[in-house]
Each structure stands twice: as C-alpha cells, then as structure tokens.
Image (cartoon, rainbow, N blue to C red):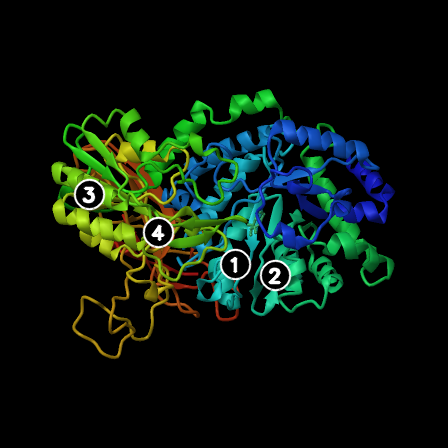
Amino acid sequence: MTEQELKHLLQSMSLEEKVGQMVQVTGAFLEEDAVITGPAADAGLELSDCKLAGSILGIAGAKRLRKIQERYMEEHPHHIPLLMMADVIHGYRTVFPIPLALGASFHPELVEKAMTMAAAEAASAGLHVTFSPMTDLVRDPRWGRVLESFGESPWLDARMAEAYVRGYQGPDNDLSRPGRLSACDKHFVGYGAPVAGREYNHAELSEHTLREFHLPAKIAAIRAGTACVMPAFQSLNGVPCTASEKIVRNLLRDELGFEGVTISDWSAVGELVAQGAAENTREAAKLAIEAGIDIDMMSVCYARELKGLVESGEVEERLVDEAVWRILTLKNRLGLFEDPFHGAGVQEEKRTVLCEKHRDLARSLVAESVILLKNEDAVLPLDSGSRTAFIGPYVDSTDTCGSWAIFQNREDTVTLRRGVTEGGYGANAVFCHGCDVLENTRVLGFGVEEVFGQSENRDEWIREALQAAKEADRVVMALGEHTLQSGEAASRGDITIPHQQMELLRQISAVNPNVVTVVYSGRPLDLREVSACSKAVLAVFLPGTMGGAGIADVLFGRTSPGGRVSISFPWSVAQVPVYHDDYTTGRPYDPAGAEQKFVSRYLDMPNEPLYSFGYGLTYGIFRYSPVRLSAGSMGQGQILTASVTVKNEGSMAAKETVQLYLRDEKGTTVRPRRELKGVKCLYLQPGEEGEAVFEITEDLLKIWDKHMNFLAEPGWFTIYVGGDSRTENSARFRYEG
Ligand code: GLC
C-alpha cells in the first residue's frame, strides 16, 4: 500500500476501529491451546474486547494463523490484517542455546546466522513479530531472566543486539521479504537491575549508570532498526516505564529517534493500578497513551477506556492517530495488505522447521557456547575407548531448552545419552539416573504447579550410580537447576545446585576422583563445591535442541569448548553484584599485596568472582605476543590499532576468543577498572599462528562526563588484550583530544 493509501485508510477508520488496532490479546481467545505467557485469567478481557484487535500473541503454525487471519479480515470493517506476535527468544522449533549461552560464544556473526534461521522457521509458521532480543544488562544471577540476557558487558550486549536484529530483519531491514521477522527490543529500560534481584521489583539507576551501562545495547538495537520496542514492567527511579513520558517519549523517541511501534509488556498497563501509579484502568489508559505506548498487551485498559477518554476530550485523538499510524505502517512494511500471510504456508513450514542446516548450526553453537571452567590433569577430552559412567538427572532429560522455548517439541531434543551414543562415543559408556533434578518441592510453571516428591527408586538409583562409578575410568555428572528455576518470575536467593544432586556428587567423587561435572543452568550458579568435587567443570547452561550432541562433541574432543564467561560466576551470592567493569575505589584492594586493613574488601570472602568475565578454557594452549600499538598517542578523528599474534602451542585445534579491554586511567567521572571493547575469534590448528587487530576509535573512548556530556576526554589509556578480563598483557597510549 502506498503511504497515501495508508493515510486514507487511517482517515476512514472509526475511533472504535482505531482503538482496536491498539489492543493485543493472546491467541487463547481464538484457540484454546495457545501458549499463555502471563496471568491471562487475571486480565479480565472478554471476546467482545477482541473483535477489532490489531494483533494477537502466543499462537503459531501456518495452518492455524492463516485460518485466524482469513476469518478476522473477513469480519473486520476495513479488512485490516492482524499482526501475529510471539516470543521466539532463541529459536522457534530448532531451539538454540539460551541467549546467556549465545552471549558466552562471544560470536555475534554466528548468532546472527542463528537468528536468521529462527526467523525463517517462525515466519514460515505465520509469525510477523518476535518479542526479542532481550537486551537488558544483567549483573545479578539471582534474577531468573538472566537466562534471556547476553550478560554483564554493555559492549557485548550491543553486538549481540545488532546480531539479533539483523538476523531477524535482514541486513536491509526489508520486512516484506518472506522469512523475515520484525524484532522487538526489550525491555525498555533497566529491567535487568531489579532491587535485590527480585523479579518485577523496582530499579534505581542514576542517569550516569543508565547511560553508561544499560542503554548501549538498546541504542544498538534501535540503530540496527528494531521494528518494535517493549517498555519494561518495572518502575525506574520511581516511575513505571509503562507510564513514563520521560522514558518512552523523551528518551526512546525524541532522543534516540525510535520511530517504530511500542508495545507494553503483558498486562503492564493494567498493572499501573497495582503499582499505585493509576487510580483505575481509565487513568492507567490515559497515562500509557500519554507516555507513548502504542499497543496495550493483554489488559482491558485501551479496549475499555481509550474511546471514552478521547470522546470526553481527556485524551487528544491525535495521540491515538499517531499510534495507529505506526501500527499500520508496520503492517505495511511487512507487506500484509498485499499478502496477509507473509509467505507462511504448511509446505514452507515443513521445509524450513528443524531442517538439517538449522540443526547443524544449533549443534555447533552448543560447542561455541559451553564454558570449560576447570580441566585438572587434562581429564577432558575423554577417550571413548575407556569406560565412562554418565550419571545424573540430566543424562536423559529433554527439558534442556529453557523456559522460553514455548514452541519446541520436547521429543526433538537430543539428550546427553543420545548425543553420546549417536555421536559414536558410547562403546564403553554406561548411563545412570542417579537422582531427580528436584525433590520434595513444588515449583510454579506457566499456569501449572509442578510437584516433586521423592522417588521410591531413589536408593536403588544411588546404589547403581555408585557401582557404575567404581567400575569406570571417568565419571561425567550431568547436574543442574531445574528449567523452572530460571526464566521469568524465577528469581532465586540460593543459586546452588539442588541439594540431593550435590549429595550424589559428593558420594560419587568419594569413590572415583576422575569426575567431570556438566552443569545445566539458566544462570551462573555458585559452583564452589562442584569445583571442589570435580576435576573438570563444563557449564552448558540450557543448550537447546541439539544440546546432547554438542556437549558430547566437546566431551570427546571432536570440537574444543568455545564459550567464555558472559556474566561473572560469583564466589558466593553474597558478592552480588560482582562484575568485571566495576569502578575502582580510593582504597583499592590488591589480593596479591600485603595484608591491608583500610581497603575495599570483605573480611570473609574474596572480592573477585569464582570465574571472571571472559574466562574459559579450551583444548588449545594459546600464547600471546605483547600488545603492539600503531602509535603511542592519537588525536581527534584519528584511529589507533592494537594487535597481537596468537599461537596455538597445543596439540588440538581450538578457538581462542581474543578480548580487548580498555582502562581510562582518569576521567571527570570514575572509570571501570577495565571494560570489554573488542573481540576477535581465532580458530587455530596446532602450531598455527593468527593475528588479532583492533581499531581504537574516539567512539570507544567516549564516557559520560560529570556534566553528563558524552565525549572522549584527553588522557592516558591502558589497553589489555588477552584470553579473559584479568589479562595483564597491556600497552598504554595517550589520547590528545
Ligand atoms: C512476558 C515478558 C515479556 C514477553 C511477554 C509476552 O511477561 O515479560 O518479555 O515478551 O510477556 O509473552
């Protein structure tokens, strides 16, 4: 449709129709088996609210959505097509590792490829918009949604945000092309910093912290062209984002130039009442539209109140027209007025979903994202000729895709046992359950409560596991938190592996010291005791459809582990928040120095995390040359290059994630001890050398100064280039300004 035709359409719509475009309901109102991702029952919506809805969420499948679209367009007065939206967070049916693991790959190019595949599958199934990427910066592993984040580095988060948007929307952002999916960057802003790590809790961020740490990834997603943005549930500095003109209109739209569609989070407009920001749903609707919320997801506010607010003159119709214009423009960009199905079809879906190319990349990304945290006596890689006992509740679990894999079929998931046997590694392997993931507890899932008792087979499982361990050369323990213990509404104060699994690990390691522990989790856990009981520790997070295959490839050395810590693994949850780009203090603590009293430290634990940002072992042995700078100083507009030569002196091919950190030695605001500003992934054969060259531009030096100006200040900088955030391989240069 031309812009003129679209304008004519808008002008011909009734107020009721226009308000309808601003309402989004779950497919549950159209089909009973849609996925409920929020308190649908509490929303209070009825079918009458939905007849003019402009979009639906939570339903997928070409056949279903074509049928819904046909009926809705037939009944709609202007036959306007629906937008079909859903949470495709890290894959549709081919589920990739969770975003926290994808962040650990430090490989945006591969992640972009994965999101292109996710978009192809989801679009073939009839979806137009995904509520992804989640670009919230997270430093608190108690918060359950850390699994959806890319971790603690603003720079890495920004690169992953760009990769996600480009993957979904294509490098040309032409949404009309088949296989494209509109991105929705979320949550705007500060949702990843809830006080006490407790879900939905308020966030208190200074302007400086907001801009220095929490905005860069959002800005990257906007610059990459994200079609939508979802304001966050929580209040930021006392004002709910959903009702904040300062956050949505002034910052997101006016300052950052976002021109796309804003969509509230699930029932967030209605929840303004519970937040004490609105007296009732009428006031909530008024606050939200004035803040700049275009679509009200799953609350009655716009559906029941907006028309009356306009008719009474309390809300200018102009605000409704602007919102509807943005919504119609998105539909037009998708080409829905010409093809309401956007290329979706049962045949296309069959051809695309879970195809070999997608499964192959999913398998490779498992290896790229798992983090080898410990490997004493080179106990890994395993030799398939020796006897290996695989023990633990994750040996046969298909529940390894995370809580947002809402369209997956569990039977598609490759378990660890299948990965070992189908990968040709199983000749001398035995498999034991050992214990359940959870015992004697109840966990709430999406609308259902899962009750975990204590199996009457428990003692038999333990006896069998101990016997297998005694007879084996190596033991691989497959342990971890339950999928329901991470994700939305799954904050944990105790971030350890469930107690009966730890009891099993203690008993097994007492009969066989050669223990490799594979840890499944949606967050960095407190792994002190796991490490003490294991010679090797491999963090696999929630590895997705091909998890078992990719993990087996790493365990048996077909490929080297490629992941690096994307969010610090705390020594104890009591350290939280602990992160690499923290500020120094006037009394820094040097653990290597003499005993110091009046310094910034704990009396009863280290300052440093158990595993630092950027850390990860591989099957290679990498030697770095000193850092070479192209000059000792740089002026305005100039570019400096920093390079290193890296040699694999090991006997196995491996990927080395070369990281560049920057330390601004002095600023008008205090500066992080060091912060990630560049990554190069080098794949080197034994004996092979590679070069990593980084460009240092003025943009990389910019900070928010004490007047809140974003600029590069003259002074000395130290560059660190190495295999993790604690490297001392460094060089200095001066920026002359
Ligand atoms: C959830 C999440 C949001 C998601 C939305 C739709 O509550 O906060 O990230 O996209 O609802 O499922």
Query: Mark 3 sits on what residue?
Result: 463
Instruction: Count up the numbered dots.
Output: 4
Q: Secondary structure at mark 3?
A: helix
Residue at 41% across / 63% down in the picture?
714
Please identify the quarter of the rendering in which residue 680 is found: top left
Say whether disc 1 or disc 4 marks the residue closer to the N-terminus: 1
Q: State the residue lying farthest toward the bottom.
A: 598
> Label 2 crowding class (10 Å Cα cut-off): few <14, some 14-19, many 20+?
many
Please provide percent x and percent y for residue 429.
Answer: 21, 31
Figure check: 710 above or below 173: below
Residue at 32% across / 56% down in the picture?
496
Tag 2 and tag 1, C-beta contact below 8 Å? yes
Which amino acid type is shown beneath numbered disc 4? Glu
| Distance between mark 1 and mark 3 Cα atoms | 46 Å
| Distance between mark 1 and mark 4 Cα atoms | 31 Å
Discs 3/2, front: 3
Query: Mark 2 sits on what residue?
Result: 241
Say whether disc 1 or disc 3 marks the residue closer to the N-terminus: 1
Query: Mark 4 sits on what residue?
Result: 439
Say whether disc 3 or disc 4 marks the residue closer to the N-terminus: 4
Q: Secondary structure at mark 2?
A: helix
Which amino acid type is shown beneath numbered disc 3? Arg
Please provide percent x and percent y for residue 184.
Answer: 58, 45
Say whether disc 3 or disc 2 marks the residue closer to the N-terminus: 2
Say whether disc 2 or disc 4 marks the residue closer to the N-terminus: 2
Please provide percent x and percent y for residue 386.
Answer: 14, 31
